[in-house]
Amino acid sequence: MHVEVFSTVSAFHELRTEWGQLLAQLPGQNVFLTPQWQETWWRHFGASRLLELLAVRSEAGILQGLAPLTRSSGSEGGSYVELLGDLEVCDYLDVLIAPSQQQAVTQALVTHLLAQREDPFDLRLANLAQHSATPGLLHDQLVSHGLKVEIQQIETCPTINLPTEWEAYLALLRGKDRHELRRKIRRAHAAAHLEYRVTSDVAQLDADVDTFVTLHRMSQQDAKQGFMTPVKEAFFRDMAHQLWRQGWLDLAFLSADGTPIATLCCFTYGPAYAAYNSGYHPAYAELSAGIVLFAECIRTAIARGFTAFDFMRGNEPYKYRFGATDRPLYQLLASTACPAQEARL
């Protein structure tokens, strides 16, 4: 195995086909690991970091591993390496490793990283999914080179394992939760003429993104005030166009008597239908608009054959009332200079 280093934005295009083929081999594929997502993130948020895409190839030149990394200066000098992305807008991150070449790829990556390090050296790989092989593979390799390593759970992603029929899904819910969901859906339909739709025409996309941003800002609670900053809004608009063109975005809306009252941005890449962000009109809170829209999106996911509905990061109570169970997110911290728990967060 040999490691090829890419440090310019053109690499996302150069590697796109191979990147997609490698990602398709992995369990739990998600949109955050695609070159389309990562290039869009880099355009909007990468200015303060150095790009370091590490492509691990076999002797035949076949891409067997890809570590999308960034490098910056540590707080006490040295180097700080982390996965490309951030914790606010990227729910999952990872290193891509062909299942049949895990040990060889991991060894090549660790050897390269440590040969290029500037001490003190800190490595942080965050938002690793429960099914990721990365923490286990890297832990032993890094420890064998004398680094202090810690793997810790940092968040949870509640997820529903979906059956193949809507009624079968309802039967999985606790009796009280099933009764409440049906009651809220009936009450909302009795109070107004409801319409559920997903953006289906690119000519409508910009206007629908405008509506999404408006409803999102209207529904922000104190804990999320300021999330949709101008920078994040620009990213969201760019991301929506990039993913919609690939067929990986469902921008869903619920309207009452013609007025949009709830919205949900969902990703359709991979086996899980993933709910990324939402918004609702506070004046229609009595209609439980957000809950009704989530139910419609779950129904859509079942009808389209998805095997899971991923609420992604956060343990908000409503997710569990829909029958979700926790799937932990992990991070790996490694350092040459200090205990892993003191590595920069």
Image (tube, rainbow, N blue to C red):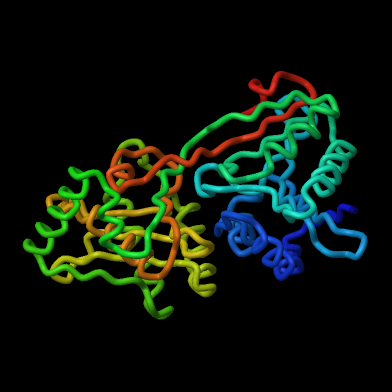
Number of callouts in the render? 0
Residue found at x 58% / y 57%: 29
Left or right relative to 285: residue 91: right
Residue found at x 71% / y 46%: 70
Location of residue 267 in the rendering, given as x and y in whole percent from the top left corner: 46, 61
Residue found at x 73% / y 52%: 97
Location of residue 142 in the rendering, given as x and y in whole percent from the top left corner: 79, 32
Location of residue 134 in the rendering, given as x and y in whole percent from the top left corner: 69, 42
Location of residue 195 in the rendering, given as x and y in whole percent from the top left corner: 21, 70
175 or 208, which is in the foreground? Answer: 175
Quarter of the rendering occupied by the C terminus: top right
35 or 79, which is in the foreground? Answer: 35
195 or 78, which is in the foreground? Answer: 195
272 or 120, which is in the foreground? Answer: 272
Residue found at x 9% / y 57%: 187
| 92, above or below 193, in the image | above
